[in-house]
Amino acid sequence: MTDIASEQSKTAALDVTTPAQRSLQQRTTSAIDRVAVDVSAARAALQEGSPDRLLQAEDRMRSAVDVADAWSTRLGKGAP
């Protein structure tokens, strides 16, 4: 969570001046925020120990990672 919070701060602190940069910043922030929420939910599920919650948390984490990976790939290709 510390690393995720650090990336959230760094992304929010970027000096963006154009609408395109602002859009990229917002989409990146959204992807990072989703990962943060799902990591937090997974941690809570682990503490609870409910098999159903653990499976749900695993599914959500996989989905969040897929979204973050896809966005990272688009950024690497010069996403608009």
Image (cartoon, rainbow, N blue to C red):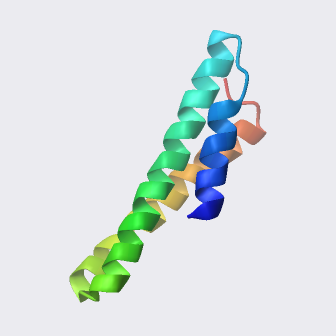
Q: Viewed as shown, does residue 4 lie left or right of 63?
A: right
In the depicted view, which residue is nearer to us: 12 or 74?
12
Q: Residue at x 29, y 89 (%)?
A: 49
The C terminus, quarter of image: top right
Q: Quadrant of residue 69?
A: bottom right
Count of marks placed on residues: 0
Q: Quadrant of residue 79?
A: top right
Q: Is residue 9 above or below residue 62?
A: above
Q: Is residue 68 above or below residue 48?
A: above
Whether residue 69 can be seen here? no
Whether residue 18 can be seen here? yes
In the depicted view, which residue is nearer to us: 14 or 75?
14
The N terminus, quarter of image: bottom right
Q: Residue at x 69, y 10 (%)?
A: 18
Residue 14 x, y percent position in the rendering = 71, 29
Q: Residue at x 41, y 65 (%)?
A: 40
Q: Residue at x 66, y 37 (%)?
A: 11
